[in-house]
Amino acid sequence: MPLALLALAIGAFGIGTTEFAVMGLLPDMAAGFGVSIPLAGYATTVYALGVVIGAPLMTAVGTRFTRKQMLMLLMGLFIVGNLLTATAPNFGIMLAGRVVAAFTHGAFFGIGALVAADLVAPEKRATAISLMFSGLTIANVVGVPAGTVLSQQFDWRTTFYAITALGVLGLLGIAKLVPAQRAKAASPLGSEIAVFRNPQVGLAMLMTVLGFGGVFAAVTYLASMMTEVTGFAPSSVIWLTAVFGLGMVGGNLVSGRFTDRAMMPMLFVSMTGLALSLAAFNFTAHHKTAAIVTIALIGIFGFATVPPLQKRVMDQAAAAPTLASAGNIAAFNFGNALAAWLGGIVISAGLGYTAPNWVGALMTVAALGVAIFATALERRQTGRGRVVAAGGADATADEPVAAAHG
């Protein structure tokens, strides 16, 4: 694989660390600002909403630059956002810093996925995408546990200073390793917007919102769930997040290979496994060994959905994929925000720290329903297209059938 994929993975590692680090820092951040755990969970919610808003906005800005230039600009903004978070004097400023950092997320992964896919042969595109996203998953094995250690040894602000340094490293890596000639500019904005007329693009994004969003219903409150329900010591959160991260790495890489061979079957398998794992977590969270296994399974199946979900959007918007690709990253994070918010609601309602797992399971089941509908619609459209082709340019889908019975 091209060395440029390493540069993209470095940037993804930094972004993944700042996105997921909060799940290990949440109790310390809540205590530091004197707010409740559900309110502190807004650090996840506003980040995800920042991705939703920033993805189309930054992608529109990116139509004026080459993809390499835009990736470098995004990493610069990432540095500013995390530095603001680290130095925030109050809870509101901290949330603002999270939003600034989040503005880079959707466009970085959306544009980065296109650059990664262009670096390899067509039959290896999903594998290349999964390798770029491996930086995001490895962040959960290395970055998030390391961030939790820094928070416990010093304070949560130290973690965000370290993330800022990761941003600097990512910027240097992109400048050095990504070839400018392979990081071309996006299509005109009008062409990018036009692809959303295809209903399959919207359905694919809805799958993303509901399917992957279910993961965050559980992991946003993982630290509190493991300490308050399962009985782990606070220090155990470090390696529990690493277990989740290892599952993410494995699920993402294996899924990338199988997605190149059979995209929709891989999507159905991964979402079914995720729904079952989230439902099971309501019961296994009360037992330490079972909880550890379930955390790994949520990581495996959760990130096994990423390559097929991202590739489906890119395939459906192949004529002008930049905005759709970034938009799907926004869809991932809108699902994250929705799930974290709903999880906070059920906790605040007194249903307990395991209740968000039911939220996640139901969201993923709904995503399966959307996937089934999209597949059936696609087959119906394909069948009509074949009939039209066989019957002539002016024939309708029903005319050949009528002729057959005439």
Image (tube, rainbow, N blue to C red):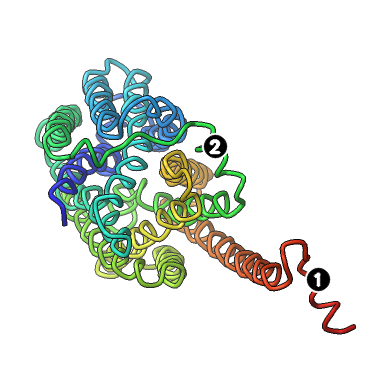
How far across and down, in percent of the image, does residue 178 sit? 18, 39
| Amino acid at circle 2 | Ile
| Residue occupying image coordinates x 13% and y 43% | 146
Q: Where is residue 105 in the image (x, y as percent from the top left)?
A: 34, 36
Q: For residue 282, which quarter of the picture?
A: bottom left
Q: Which amino acid does label 1 sit on?
A: Asp
Q: What element carries label 2?
A: helix
User: Along the line of sight, which residue is nearer the eye, 264 or 271?
Assistant: 264
Q: In which quarter of the image is residue 58?
A: top left
* Residue extending furthest toward the bottom: 405
Counting the numbered discs, the total is 2
Mark 2 vs mark 1: give the one in front: 1
Location of residue 253 in the rendering, given as x and y in whole percent from the top left corner: 25, 63
Would residue 118 be found to the left or right of residue 354 on screen? left
In the foreground, 214 or 264: 264
Q: Which disc is residue 193 wearing?
A: 2
Q: Does residue 261 appear in this view?
A: yes
Q: In this view, does 387 lie above or below 43?
A: below
Looking at the rendering, in which quadrant would you find the C terminus? bottom right
Spatial distance from mark 2 to mark 1, Cα to Cα? 32 Å
Q: Residue at x 54, y 37 (%)?
A: 193
Q: Judge whether residue 347 can be spotted in this image.
A: no
Residue on which disc 1 sits? 398
N-term-proximal mark, 2 vs 1:
2
